[in-house]
Amino acid sequence: MAHAPIVLNDPGRFKDPANLTWERYIALQTRERERYLTERATIPQGALDFTTVNPRYLERAIEQFANNYFPEQSATRYIATAAANAPFEELKTCCLFQLADEQRHLEMDREVFERAGIPERDWLPAWEQPGTTCRFFRHVLELEDPIEIIVKANFVAEGAAGPGTFAVLADGAEARGDILSAVNHRARVRDETRHISYARALVKALVEDDPGNLAVIQRWQDESLRLFVEVAKGGTRREWWEGFLGSYYKIALPLGLRPTSLS
Ligand SMILES: [Fe+2]
Ligand SMILES: [Fe+2]
């Protein structure tokens, strides 16, 4: 692995906020799976088959489905890299639990694409067009430094796209009859919240370890948010974008980070 711009000299400063062991993680995910299956069992067949979902919604939803599916697929890969390169055990464990979470999210999103009858050859082109999350995730997939991956992907991207925007996406899908996407978003948000909180604990530990680390984290934030700007373009996503920045700054500013200038 190439040079690591920042390190946590005292790993004892980092504690998994969820305090998970493998045993607790498996128990937690068993409960989550039961809860998910119970909610999924209430979805009417027409919604599951996408026959009662507005066809015009479906045409426009392909890009949204791609913006769900490929980030989850990317997450399984970059968090595996972070786990492999993790500098200490407690962080490695957090990454491995997250890897299992992201794999389930990926499978939920694959089911949406398949049930909606969208041919697989159309998935990637929908994500590679301008205005998607593709540029950001392709950047993260090139990284090897586990700290940079977790700061950019978990702290910045999930911190921004976390609770607020998944609620907006769930409500939007449900209003158009796409109950499966709504149930999926509400299920994944519980895991994403945990991914954000361990990244936040890592950033806090890094800044306490050496206040000079803040400048590097600021640069990573600026790089990340600038790669996301294009997703906000077109005005239609204005509300989503404001929620995106708002959720992120709520966790970032108290740690000493400044808003990124986005022009
Ligand atoms: Fe995920
Ligand atoms: Fe996640």
Image: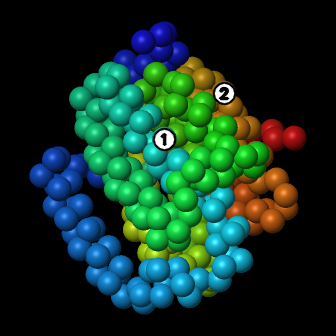
First in sequence: mark 1 vs mark 2: 1
Residue at the far left in the pictured view: 23
Characterize the local packing of mark 2: few (<14), some (14-19) or many (20 or more) Cα atoms within 10 angstroms: few
Measured as percent of width and height from the top left, residue 195 is found at 41, 49
Horizontally, residue 23 falls left or right of residue 106, namely left
* Position above or below: 98 against 152: below
Residue 154 seen anywhere in this rendered image of the structure: yes
Horizontally, residue 231 falls left or right of residue 136, namely right
Judging by the rendered image, the residue that carries numbered circle 2 is 219
Distance from disc 1 to disc 2, alpha carbons, whole Å, reads 22 Å
Q: Amino acid at mark 1?
A: Ser
Characterize the local packing of mark 1: few (<14), some (14-19) or many (20 or more) Cα atoms within 10 angstroms: some
Horizontally, residue 85 falls left or right of residue 74, namely left
Front residue of 109 and 88: 109
Judging by the rendered image, the residue that carries numbered circle 1 is 74
Q: Which colour scheme appears in the figure? A: rainbow
Residue at the far right in the pictured view: 263
Disc 1 Cβ-to-ligand 1 distance below 8 Å: no
Q: Secondary structure at mark 1?
A: helix
On residue 239, which mark appears? Answer: none
Give the quadrant of residue 202: top left
**Which residue lies at the image location 16% right of the left edge and 61% below the top edge?**
27
Residue at the far top in the pictured view: 3
Quadrant in which the C terminus appears:
top right
Q: Secondary structure at mark 2?
A: helix
Residue 259 seen anywhere in this rendered image of the structure: no
Q: Amino acid at mark 2?
A: Arg
